[in-house]
Image (tube, helix red, strand yellow):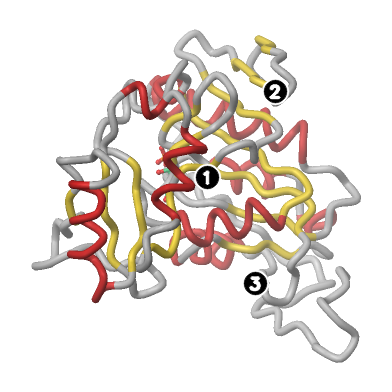
Amino acid sequence: MPSPVSPTIRPVVLSRIGQPTKLISPVKDQNLSVLERSKQLAAWTAVDQHVKPEHRVIGIGSGSTVPYVVERIVQLGAEPNQDRVFIPTGFQSKELIVSSGLNLGDVDQFPTIDVTLDGADEVDHELNCIKGGGACHLREKVLAEAANTFILVADFRKNVEYLGTNFTPGVPIEVVPFAYAKVLQNLHHILGSPNASLRMAVKKAGPVVSDNGNFIIDAPFDLEKMKTPYTIMAQIKMLTGVVEVGLFCNMAKAAYFGNEDGSVTIKWNDGRVEQVAAPQ
Ligand SMILES: O=C(CO)[C@H](O)[C@H](O)COP(=O)(O)O
């Protein structure tokens, strides 16, 4: 069983640990479209290469690609997973972990994670990425920072030279609710994002509320600014009322992109780019 944060704090793992239970794949239908298959290929390849037998604490990200990560982990079987704890980045991944029969933990019990696998809205040539399309980027960044290895999984549409190429809503910014108008004003008039706007819910009147009870602003920036994402991230983060910015800079070790032809492109943080065949 993995060590908890200190010998005096006992981890409260919500699912049972140490006993093999029947695991259930979160992916039922295998009649996948080309796009869904590309997500699956990226996820499976990343799990095969980065979830090691000795790993005990694994971070599970959010979005539509991550169910395929869990699918591959479930395929490893009950035995290797019985002594592992899986840490979610939000409501969706918590449900995914629990419904698959995997052991659930939290980052306050396990602040060091062996590997975190997560999706991305877009990834640039230096592995900087936009995250937060699903409003989970605060927890996602905590789990990325807590991980010894942070791995991105995505479909071919996310593989770009510069951020903002295909993903146009802008940089997701989590803000405390009472500060949103003031942060918007700063984004419009000081940081150069005149179209920054509060993200509105679809099946609810009013704004999207994150898993942490906060609002989300989407702030588009021009290409010149997005060429140096760390600078704009630091400027946004300095605005009082901002909780976290959905720009992840210099964090990922590798990004896996599933392609339409069934291959997977792997970009490494040392600049290497590999093309591999689909896993079976
Ligand atoms: O950052 C995220 C949620 O906040 C997701 O990881 C991101 O939106 C990618 O999702 P998908 O795999 O559905 O493309």
Q: Position of residue 111 (x, y in %)?
A: 74, 67
Which residue is under mark 2? 268
Q: Residue furthest bottom?
A: 8
Q: CA distance from mark 3 to mark 1?
A: 17 Å
Amino acid on which disc 1 is placed? Val
* Secondary element type, mark 2: strand
Q: Is residue 276 visible?
A: no
Q: Position of residue 127 (x, y in %)?
A: 58, 28
Residue at 34% of width from left, 75% of height from top?
Answer: 213
Which residue is under mark 3? 106
Which residue is under mark 1? 66
Amino acid on which disc 2 is placed? Trp
Which image quarter holds the C terminus? top right
* Secondary element type, mark 1: helix
Which image quarter holds the N terminus? bottom right
Q: Is residue 178 visible?
A: yes
Q: Earlier in the sequence, mark 3 or mark 1?
A: 1
> Left of 265 or right of it: where is 164?
left
Q: Position of residue 78 (x, y in %)?
A: 77, 57
Which one is nearer the viewer's eye here, 244 or 272?
244
Instruction: Classify 69 as above or below 180.
Output: above
